């Protein structure tokens, strides 16, 4: 879980949130977890943040139009905390899926990364809308 883009955008970060941005932008270093059958990206994120005591807030699938969980904030850093196009995105094996984290089922050996974007709906982290 990382927020390195914030390091170059601190001037745009909402006041008072600086204390939640680690000096190196890494909230959680690479960590291995065992997968349960049918685990999704969201399932693992939820387990990891609970186990590591990292704050995480989400909106449930039944509350939004996409039928998937939406991650609102991790480590007290929320959507729009650094501008109108900022928020959390995930990638698996270097790819940014175009569907929700509770819809992406992981396989053994997959590498997932949660990253905070500040610009262009992911343009600053290698994602974004083409």
Image: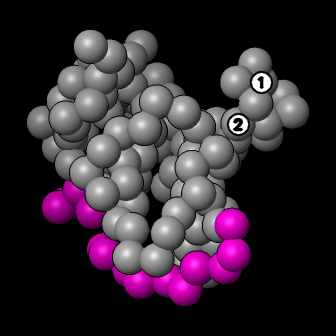
- Res. 120 visible in picture: yes
Q: Residue at x 27, y 63 (%)?
A: 26
Which class describes the residues within 10 Å of circle 2: few (<14), some (14-19), or many (20+)? some
Q: CA distance from mark 2 to mark 1?
A: 7 Å
The residue labelled by disc 2 is 68
Colouring mode (rainbow / by chain / secondary structure / one colour)? one colour
Q: Are marks 2 and 1 in contact (CB under 8 Å)?
A: yes
Task: Classify mark 2: helix, strand or loop.
Answer: loop
Task: Give the SS element for disc 1.
Answer: loop
State the residue at coordinates (41%, 46%): 90
Q: Which mark is residue 64?
A: 1
| Residue displayed at 12% across by 36% down | 8
Q: Is residue 129 above or below residue 30?
A: above
Quadrant in the rendering for residue 66 = top right
Q: Is residue 54 visible?
A: no
Q: Which residues are magenta?
A: 22-38
């Amino acid at each position: 879980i990382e927020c390195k883009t914030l390091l170059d955008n601190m001037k745009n970060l909402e006041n008072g949130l600086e204390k939640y941005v680690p000096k190196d932008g890494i909230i959680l270093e690479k960590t291995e977890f065992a997968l349960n059958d049918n685990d999704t990206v969201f399932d693992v994120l939820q387990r990891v943040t609970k186990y590591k005591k990292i704050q995480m807030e989400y909106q449930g699938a039944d509350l939004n139009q996409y039928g998937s969980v939406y991650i609102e904030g991790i480590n007290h850093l929320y959507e729009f905390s650094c501008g109108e196009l900022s928020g959390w995105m995930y990638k698996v094996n270097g790819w940014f899926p175009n569907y929700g984290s509770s819809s992406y089922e992981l396989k053994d050996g997959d590498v997932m990364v949660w990253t905070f974007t500040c610009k262009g709906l992911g343009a600053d982290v290698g994602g974004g809308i083409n």
